[in-house]
Amino acid sequence: MAAIIEMSRVFRYAGLDLEDPNPELAPREVLRHYARMHPRLNGAKIVDPVVEGDKQVYEFREANYGDKG
């Protein structure tokens, strides 16, 4: 029989692991929540999660306005 493992979410920004404020929030809502404390997250993007052990890790990346492309 297979075991079901419930994974927790972690949100990573600038090398910091930020706790999930509410598992019922969508990742975009969590980003808005943390943007109040870290204004540089306004306009950031969310990288698809990777699995690390029993955690789903979402990374917040700041927008690079100076980049050409």
Image (spheres, rainbow, N blue to C red):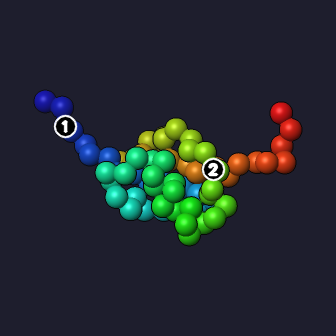
Would you say the residues marked 2 and 1 are in contact, meaning their CB atoms lie under 8 Å apart? no
Circle nearer the N terminus (2, 1): 1
Q: Amino acid at mark 1?
A: Ala
Where is mark 1, residue-wise? 3
Across and down, in percent, residue 45 comes to 61, 45
Badge 1 density bin: few <14, some 14–19, many ≥20, Cα 10 Å? few
Across and down, in percent, residue 57 comes to 47, 48
Q: Horizontally, is 32 left or right of 61 in the view?
A: left
Which quadrant is the N terminus positioned in?
top left
Give the vertical position of 20 relative to 6 (above or below).
Answer: below
Q: Horizontally, is 38 left or right of 6 in the view?
A: right
Count of residue discs: 2
State the residue lying farthest toward the top. Answer: 1
Viewer-side residue, 16 vs 63: 63
Whether residue 57 is visible here, answered yes or no, is no
Badge 2 density bin: few <14, some 14–19, many ≥20, Cα 10 Å? some
Viewer-side residue, 50 vs 35: 35
Across and down, in percent, residue 58 comes to 50, 47
Q: Amino acid at mark 2?
A: Ala
Where is mark 2, residue-wise? 44
Question: Residue at 83% across / 33% down in the picture?
Answer: 69
Across and down, in percent, residue 60 comes to 58, 51
